[in-house]
Image (cartoon, rainbow, N blue to C red):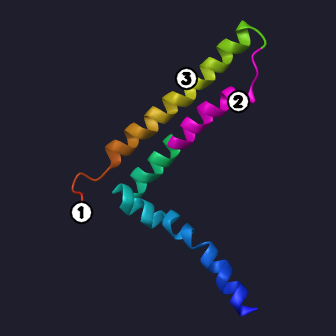
Amino acid sequence: MEHGWKRAVEAFRFLDALEFHSVKEWFGLSTVSLAAFLIGVGCLLAALAVGFLYSVDNLADFQAIQLWRIQWLLAAVAAFVAGILLKRSGEREKK
């Protein structure tokens, strides 16, 4: 029984790379800056999802979907700008 448990733990060892701390170090961002980046990525994914989730039957539907996409993309830009502005200026790339 114990051998099967160890094998299951080893199978999910790749999830260690997805730890928040590891991602922060990989990108070289502070916590707040990384959170803003992840929010921006979420907004980009939402902008893409709008096109897949809603169908276009007429011009009014097309315009509404385009407006939603624009709003999601503006939110993504705002989140990315916030992440840039909140990044600590003293942090340098480790050599």
Q: Residue at x 39, y 41 (%)?
A: 82
Looking at the rendered structure, the secondary structure element under dot 1 is loop
Residue 16 at x, y percent in the picture: 52, 70
CB under 8 Å between discs 2 and 1: no
Range shown magenta: 41-56
Q: How far is disc 2 from disc 3 in space, using C-alphas?
A: 15 Å
Q: Which residue is mark 1?
A: 94
Q: Residues within 10 Å of mark 2 (few under 14, many from 20)?
A: few
CB under 8 Å between discs 2 and 3: no
Q: Where, by quadrant of the figure, is residue 9 drawn?
A: bottom right
Q: Where, by quadrant of the figure, is residue 28 drawn?
A: bottom left
Looking at the rendered structure, the kind of residue marked 2 is Phe
Q: How far is disc 3 from disc 1 in space, using C-alphas?
A: 37 Å
Q: Earlier in the sequence, mark 2 or mark 3?
A: 2
Q: Earlier in the sequence, mark 2 or mark 1?
A: 2
Looking at the rendered structure, the kind of residue marked 3 is Ile
Looking at the rendered structure, the kind of residue marked 1 is Lys
Q: Is residue 75 magenta?
A: no
Q: Is residue 51 magenta?
A: yes
Q: Which residue is mark 3?
A: 70
Residue 33 at x, y percent in the picture: 39, 51
Residue 30 at x, y percent in the picture: 36, 57
Q: Residue at x 66, y 82 (%)?
A: 7
CB under 8 Å between discs 3 and 1: no
Q: Which residue is mark 2?
A: 52
Taking the image as shown, residue 57 lies to the left or right of residue 29, namely: right
Q: Residues within 10 Å of mark 1 (few under 14, many from 20)?
A: few
Q: Residue at x 72, y 85 (%)?
A: 4
Q: Where, by quadrant of the figure, is residue 42 drawn?
A: top right
Q: Residues within 10 Å of mark 3 (few under 14, many from 20)?
A: few
